[in-house]
Image: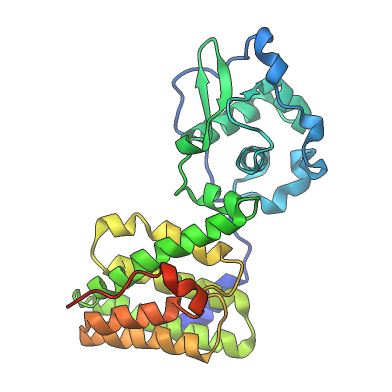
Amino acid sequence: MSTLAHTMMTAARSTDSGLAGPGELDRYPFGEAPVAERVGAPVWESAEPELGRVGRRAAGSRGRGLHGQLVQQLGQMIVSGDLGADRPLVPEEIGQRFEVSRTVVRESLRVLEAKGLVSARPNVGTRVRPVSDWNLLDPDIIEWRAFGPQRDDQRRELNELRWTIEPLAARLAAGHGRAEIQQRMSDMVEIMAHAMGQGDALTYSRADAEFHSLLIQVAGNRMLEHLSGIVSSALQVSGGPVTGCDRPNDASLGHHGRIVDALAAGDGTAAETAMRALLTVHPEVERVVPAPREH
């Protein structure tokens, strides 16, 4: 096993660090909603019992500490529909329900505003925004939708986007000849093969995610690079055998290897074909896979 493979195998077993940080928006204070509007305030007691004190669910949070946990829980409640559109969110009530300070609540609401889930206005307070305003490409929202009531729609939509993005990325990548990235992709295939032989699903999935991220990077299209988070999120929340990345086997590894070979040969058509073969493993999903290009 190569040094890179050993390093990644070790890293895959380490504990994930938090990814979320405080929001960037600070245009106005999150004032308390007018008393007259509290009639429509959330009935916290009707929420999922597990959503009690935020400190009890630290493991599921992307952020660090109480702030990250509250973002996670409020985000899940909004996305699941427990907190419907235009419902007022009063900081004092949230703080009491989740046993956190007003500062933690304010910072959490700022993050949710940056994601398009809530809006705050002077003399109006903070309210949940409709789905049409959400940043549906935000990794957290993708995750919350994928494990909530909208899970089927979210996973289908993610895979449809992958079938659109990745075959194109594979074709473009074949014409750029970035040997160092192609070598790293080859290394990822080696790591995946070793991990599959060892039954190490975590290392396999991380090498797989790195492979697909590198592919989009080498495509040389900056707009596609901005969509790479979609692919990573899709790999993390696929939740079923929809593509060749969801069920590791020799055939899946073979498709990954053929993509690398096609890139090395500068054969865009072969790279695109191999990617389509990797993504399409069940006849029932072929209807949403974009047809091959005419050349």
Residue 93: x percent and y percent? 73, 22
Residue nearer the viewer, 180 or 244? 244
Quarter occupied by residue 214: bottom left
Quarter occupied by residue 147: bottom right
Residue drawn at x 52%, y 33% as measured from the top left:
130
Residue 209: x percent and y percent? 47, 70
Quarter occupied by residue 37: top right
Viewed as shown, does residue 198 lie left or right of 2?
right
Residue 165: x percent and y percent? 34, 64
148 in relation to 207, above or below = above
Residue nearer the viewer, 146 or 19? 146
Viewed as shown, does residue 13 lie left or right of 24?
right
Viewed as shown, does residue 265 lie left or right of 206?
left
Residue nearer the viewer, 217 or 152? 152
Residue 280 visible in the shown view: yes
Residue 251: x percent and y percent? 49, 89
Quarter of the picture containing the C terminus is bottom left
